[in-house]
Image (tube, rainbow, N blue to C red):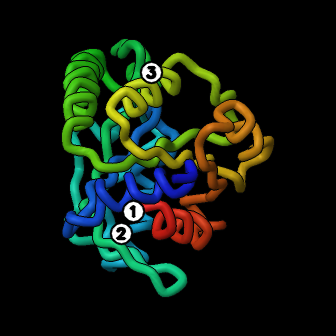
Amino acid sequence: MPLGGIINWLRNALFGRKKSVSLGLYGSPNTGKTTLANKICMDFIGEPMGAVSEIPHETRTVQKKEKVRLRSNGRSIEMNLLDMPGIASKVDYRDFVSYGLHAKKAKQRAKEATRGIIEAIKWLENVDAALVVMDATQDPYTQVNLTILGNLEARHIPVILVANKIDKKGASHKRVQEAFPQYATVGVSALNGSNMDELYKVLTERM
C-alpha cells in the first residue's frame, strides 16, 4: 500500500470510530491559543472559550468546550476543544510583577501556572489531535516548541501547526513552516479572523 494510503488508513482507524475528536491547543504562553479557541467557538457555537490577557499564563487550567461541530467545504467534524495552559520551561513570579501584579498575587499566579503546565502535559493522554500554536512574529525554533512536538510525536498524535498573528509586523508563517517542514502549517490571525477558513479546511481534511 502506498504511504499516502497507509496514512489515510491510520487516520480512519484512529478517528473513524469516535463520535468526537479531542483537539488540544498547545503552545507557549501568549501565542494566542485562547484567542484562537475563542474564534473557533464563536464561529461554530456562538460563545467564547475563555478570557484573554497580555499577562502570561492567563489560562492556568485546561478549558473545554464539547460538541463543537466544525464545518468546511461540505465536510464536518465534531470536536471536544481543549484550550491548554501555556507550556514554559520555567515560571518566575517576578515576570508577573513586571506586569503590575503585587508580589503575593504574582507568586500565587506562578504556582497556578506551574500546576497548569503539569495538567496540560497530563492531558496528552486524552488528546486525539493537536494544534500547536506559534507566534509568527517570533523564532519558532525554541526548546518549548521542540518539547511539545516531541511529546506529541512520541504519542503518535496528529499535529497541525498554526502560525498565529500574521497581521502583526514582521510576522512570517513561512518561518514556522521552514522550521518544521514535516508538519502542515497554516498562517492565521485568530484576532481578526484572517485565513481561518484555510485552517478549518485543513482540519476537516486531516481529521
Q: In this view, does 43 lie above or below 30?
A: below
Query: Real-space Cα distance between discs 3 and 1?
Result: 25 Å
Left or right: 40, with 172 as reference point = left
Disc number for residue 12: none
Mark 2: amino acid:
Cys
Mark 1: amino acid:
Asn
Mark 3: amino acid:
Thr
Q: Mark 3 points at which residue?
A: 147
Q: Name the residue under label 2.
A: 41
The local crowd at label 2, few if under 14, some if 14 to 19, many if 20 or more residues have their Cα within 10 Å, is many
Q: Can residue 109 be seen in this view?
A: no
Q: Is mark 2 on a helix, strand or loop?
A: helix
Residue 166's spot in the image, x, y percent? Answer: 70, 52
Query: In the image, what residue occupies the spot 29% across and 49% down?
Result: 128
Q: Is residue 191 above or below residue 19?
A: above
Query: In the image, what residue occupies the spot 51% across and 43% down?
Result: 133
Residue 74's spot in the image, x, y percent? Answer: 48, 87
Q: What element carries label 1?
A: helix
Q: In which quarter of the image is residue 38?
A: bottom left
Counting the numbered discs, the total is 3
Q: Can residue 80 be seen in this view?
A: yes
Query: In the image, what residue occupies the spot 56% across and 60% down?
Result: 191
Q: Mark 1 points at which residue?
A: 38
Query: In the image, what residue occupies the spot 34% across and 39% down?
Result: 58
The local crowd at label 3, few if under 14, some if 14 to 19, many if 20 or more residues have their Cα within 10 Å, is some
Left or right: 109, with 131 as reference point = left
Query: Real-space Cα distance between discs 2 and 1?
Result: 5 Å
- The C terminus - image quarter: bottom left
Q: Is mark 3 on a helix, strand or loop?
A: helix
Q: Quadrant of residue 114?
A: top left
